[in-house]
Amino acid sequence: MNLVVMIGNLTRNPELRYTPSGTPVATFGLACNRRFKQGDELKEEVTFIDVVAFGKMAESVAQYKQKGDKVGVTARLQQQRWETEDGQKRSKHQLVANSIEFVGAKKDGGGGDPGDPESGDPDYS
């Protein structure tokens, strides 16, 4: 099973592109905070990961979310591997979104986010 669930804040505005066949693709960074106590000290650890979304979900996250906004992502973990021009092997992990939930209220106070079941708007996942 390959299933990841994270709630975090966007580290940059979503970047929307289109494949040659016209499929929307959005990429953004996600920061997920973890607070824990070590001895008498309260510590915080942040995990940063890239997220990629496709289709209507990609268009919606690019339209409605920006750096700093909170989202919940259900995804699969994927590793990309490549070789640099000088022959070094590189890799990175990213999340490929199955669904993205918009968390929190809109900043302009104009109702709920699209995808929020309580707002009455459709879920774009």
Image (tube, grey):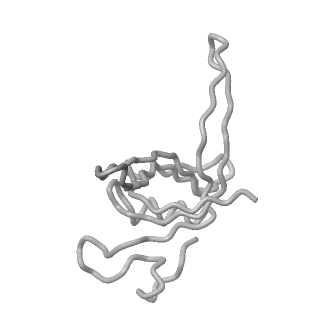
Q: In this view, does 32 lie to the left or right of 108?
A: right
Q: In which quarter of the image is the C terminus?
A: bottom right
Quadrant position of residue 62: bottom left
User: Percent x, y for residue 118?
Assistant: 43, 88
Point 23% across, 73% down: residue: 108
Q: Which sits in the foreground, 85 or 17?
A: 85
Quadrant position of residue 105: bottom left
Q: Which residue lies furthest to the left in this view?
A: 108
Point 59% across, 51% down: residue: 95
Q: In this view, does 78 lie to the left or right of 99?
A: right
**Residue 100 appearing in the image:** yes
Point 51% across, 49% down: residue: 27
Q: How many marks?
A: 0
Q: Is residue 67 left or right of residue 92?
A: left
Q: Which residue lies furthest to the top in this view?
A: 86
Q: Which sits in the foreground, 9 or 119?
A: 9
**Residue 12 appearing in the image:** no
Quadrant position of residue 75: bottom right
Q: Which residue lies furthest to the front in this view?
A: 39
Q: In which quarter of the image is the N terminus?
A: bottom right
User: Percent x, y for residue 114?
Assistant: 44, 77
State whether residue 56 is above or below residue 48. below
Q: Which sits in the foreground, 103 or 13?
A: 103
User: Percent x, y for residue 96?
Assistant: 62, 54
Point 57% across, 66% down: residue: 56
